[in-house]
Image: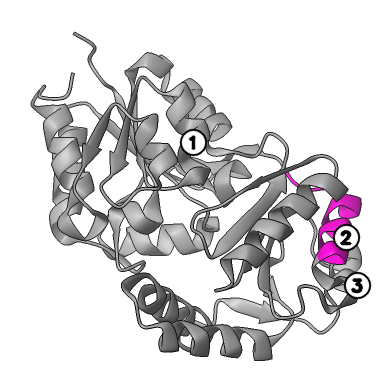
Amino acid sequence: MTTYKLFVSDMDGTILHNHTKIAPETAEIVRAAEEQGIRFAIATGRNYFNAKEILDEVGLTCPIVSSNGGRVLTETGDVLHEIDLTTEEALEVVSVLHQDHKYSDVFYEMYSEAGLVASRLDLIEATMENLKQNGDDRSLEMYEFFRKRYYVNEDVRLVEDIEDFIKKEAGRVYKFIAFSSHFEKMSSLWAEIDERVEGVYVTSSGDDNIEVMANGADKGHGVRKLAEYFGVDLSEVVVIGDNLNDVPMFEVAGKAIAMANSHDELIKISHHVTERHDEYGVANALKRVMNGEWK
């Protein structure tokens, strides 16, 4: 029987309730697992500081794979690994987004060494209004996520000229994420960036977004770095997630668990399916790993 030594969880749609918090009950199970010798880590599309803030709220300290693998940091914040877009790649991504008003209603953010950046507040306001009007659970969760990001925590730096910012101030650029409630527009944008911009990896954490990183910046590479850091074999690693950006880590880990709310493609390549993110799916999965039910 394989003894699992590392449990790596995605955040949104996985360990987070309503895209905002980790339940205290889940945090207690994580601590119990660590006492049993199973180390815990996060692999997320979010930036490091945002992910750490969420962990801090429930008293968890662990390594973090952030920006979908663009950065891997230890529990003390030391950088294990970084891979970023070149200035030319970043500018080309922006060029696609800005072309001929084709994607003029697509809101996007950039994760950089200088922080989280956006260029048009009017688009985030329009995006939020659309989400509010849609009214489904996912839309309302995303509305609350953006409301807190822009109007409560004020995590985002707004700049007028993002191309100039990339050239002069951004430093390393780890990721772009674009949002639209017009799903077909996201599919078109994915295909166009794939075709026009060499050296990038495109994925998604939901039908309403796409994420763009440098080649090699994915959660699979991030999990490999964590395994090296902890000195464990990949066969001893359990991963859990819900969407397409989790596929690379599902492909390298010894055990892959999908949430009940997962994308169909992720469920197809999982070993087990646990409850939804808002039904303590991560806590229940971790308990099953701890007690040997999921070997």
**Mark 1 or 2, nearer chain start:** 2
State the residue position of label 1.
247
State the residue position of label 2.
91
Please, is residue 238 above or below residue 89 in the view?
above
Quarter containing the C terminus:
top left
The magenta stretch is 84-96
Q: Where is residue 171 drawn, in percent x and y?
A: 80, 58
Left or right relative to 292: residue 43: right
Q: Amino acid at mark 1?
A: Val
For label 3, count other residues whose C-alpha is less than 10 Å away and answer few (under 14), some (14-19) or many (20+): few
Element class at badge 2? helix
**Mark 2 or 3, nearer chain start:** 2
In the current view of this chain or complex, which residue is farthest to the top? 1
Left or right relative to 18: residue 65: right
SS assignment for the magenta stretch, majority: helix
Q: Where is residue 32 drawn, in percent x and y?
A: 13, 39
Q: Where is residue 30 drawn, in percent x and y?
A: 21, 43
Left or right relative to 134: residue 260: left
Q: Are marks 1 and 3 in contact (CB under 8 Å)?
A: no
Left or right relative to 193: residue 43: left
State the residue position of label 3.
164
Q: Amino acid at mark 3?
A: Asp
**Mark 1 or 3, nearer chain start:** 3
